[in-house]
Image: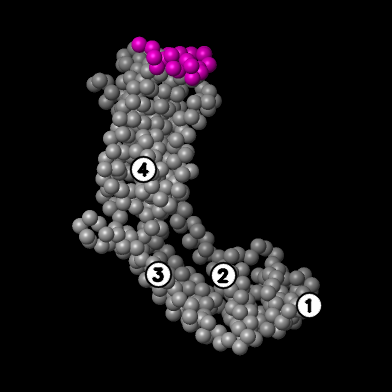
């Protein structure tokens, strides 16, 4: 067994020196940081002033639209057809047409533009029209709009968890759902990514006949374990570098463009303030209280347990599936032949992502419990449950069963690996695999 560390070292050093590993280690953080940076930066670039012409045939809305830092509303005296033809020459972003109807108050506006209007402009115009129409209807019914606005109430429902010691701490269901789902999704993708890497490595060595030389010096089981653990170390190294580099890139971006982002956010807040009434603006303090409550609820998540569980289930789930991936790679001669074996193997992992929504709705239910202790689904489902608070018995049971599942999977995979690694030119069926498992 002392040859396994040598194989691990060989697998690790061989892969981390590859150009593909170095390239993905560099591009990965850039792509992940771009998910945060690009939308913010693009939104900032699109903060130019847009002029919207208004053709109001009713005469009821011409004074309802107030200019903002980003939107300018301009009444148009031309008829609609002429205005549409001159939309580009008049430097108009769009034309808002409010047609005259048989009803006393129109309920439809038409926004003409030579490009698809963005959601901010459409939402602002729609909101102003809605509020003006509501005010006209209330006035016609003899109801004071201010009275109606004053009875609108924003309800904040806070959740408080009481632990066994009787201590209270804030919690957030939404935050727990987000943390759990993202953690499970990351494990899901990494199991597939690095498991497939093991399988392709085995197929490549088998196709090139390199494995015949290797197994003359080491046992097939040692080769399989060394390859699986070596790739796991590569995955952990790459994941750690991704997290570090992503945080560095995002931090540098925020430090450089913090002033620009602040000014952009201020302009967006002004745009939002112009689309709500004074009463609603006062009630926006409730939103700030909700945000503060969310930050307080972050403290209720046991990040020590979450981080430790993430590392364990990441490694445990990968080792479990990595053994099966290695067995599949040893049984076939090309990657195209793996399809018939891949779906039954990965079905539990795919099912765990499909059922993630139902688990988040009822994280303490019987389905959540059984799926979180079943080794083939526990790496994803248990990570979804942990932010909601999992009994330590469930967590320890899941860990123990995952370890046993890995040992059992390794035993089965080794049976297939030792025969299949030297088998060439034969189409393998499930019946043939069963014979390899029973062979002594």
Between 427 and 175, the one lying in front of the other is 175
Give the total number of marks visible in the rendering: 4
Whether residue 17 is in magenta: the answer is no
In the rendered image, residue 44, in percent from the top left (x then y), is placed at: 51, 65
Q: Which residue is mark 3?
A: 156
61 relative position to 384: left or right? right
Residue at 55% in and 84% down: 145
Q: Which residues are magenta?
A: 421-440
User: Residue 369 got which mark?
Assistant: 4
Mark 2 against mark 1, which lies toward the viewer? 1
Mark 4 against mark 1, which lies toward the viewer? 4
The numbered mark, 3 or 2, whose residue comes first in the sequence reads 2
User: Residue 79 got which mark?
Assistant: 1
Residue at 77% in and 70% down: 85
Asked if residue 232 can be seen in this view, the reply is no
Q: CA distance from mark 4 to mark 1?
A: 67 Å
């Amino acid at each position: 067994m002392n040859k396994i560390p040598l194989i691990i070292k060989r697998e690790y050093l061989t892969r981390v020196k590859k150009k593909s590993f170095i390239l993905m280690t560099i591009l990965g953080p850039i792509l992940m940081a771009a998910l945060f940076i690009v939308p913010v930066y693009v939104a900032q670039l699109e903060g130019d002033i847009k002029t919207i012409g208004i053709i109001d045939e009713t005469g009821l809305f011409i004074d309802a639209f107030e200019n903002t830092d980003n939107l300018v509303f301009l009444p148009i005296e031309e008829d609609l057809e002429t205005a549409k033809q001159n939309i580009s020459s008049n430097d108009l972003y769009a034309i808002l047409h409010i047609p005259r109807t048989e009803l006393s108050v129109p309920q439809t506006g038409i926004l003409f533009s030579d490009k698809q209007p963005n959601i901010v402009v459409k939402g602002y115009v729609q909101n102003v029209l809605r509020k003006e129409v509501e005010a006209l209807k209330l006035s016609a019914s003899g109801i004071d709009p201010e009275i109606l606005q004053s009875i609108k109430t924003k309800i904040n429902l806070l959740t408080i968890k009481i632990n066994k010691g009787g201590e209270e701490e804030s919690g957030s269901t939404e935050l727990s759902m987000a943390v759990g789902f993202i953690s499970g999704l990351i494990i899901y993708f990494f199991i597939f990514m690095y498991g497939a890497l093991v399988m392709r490595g085995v197929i490549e060595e088998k196709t090139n006949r390199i494995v015949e030389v290797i197994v003359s010096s080491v046992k097939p089981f040692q080769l399989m374990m060394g390859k699986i653990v070596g790739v796991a170390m590569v995955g952990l190294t790459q994941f750690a570098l991704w997290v570090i580099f992503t945080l560095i890139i995002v931090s540098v971006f925020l430090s450089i463009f913090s002033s620009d982002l602040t000014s952009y956010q201020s302009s967006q807040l002004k745009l939002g303030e112009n689309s709500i009434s004074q009463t609603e603006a006062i009630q926006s303090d409730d939103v700030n209280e909700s945000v503060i409550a969310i930050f307080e609820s972050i403290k209720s998540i046991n990040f020590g347990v979450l981080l430790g569980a993430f590392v364990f289930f990441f490694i445990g789930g990968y080792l479990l599936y990595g053994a099966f991936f290695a067995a599949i790679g040893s049984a076939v001669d090309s990657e195209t032949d793996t399809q018939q074996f891949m779906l039954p193997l990965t079905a539990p992992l795919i099912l765990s992502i499909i059922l993630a929504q139902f688990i988040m709705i009822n994280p303490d239910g019987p389905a959540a419990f059984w799926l979180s202790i079943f080794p083939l689904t526990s790496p994803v489902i248990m990570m979804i449950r942990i932010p909601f608070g999992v009994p330590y018995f469930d967590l320890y049971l899941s860990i123990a069963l995952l370890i046993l599942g890995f040992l059992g999977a390794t035993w089965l995979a080794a049976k297939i690996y030792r025969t299949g690694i030297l088998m060439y030119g034969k189409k393998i069926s499930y019946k043939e695999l069963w014979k390899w498992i029973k062979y002594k």
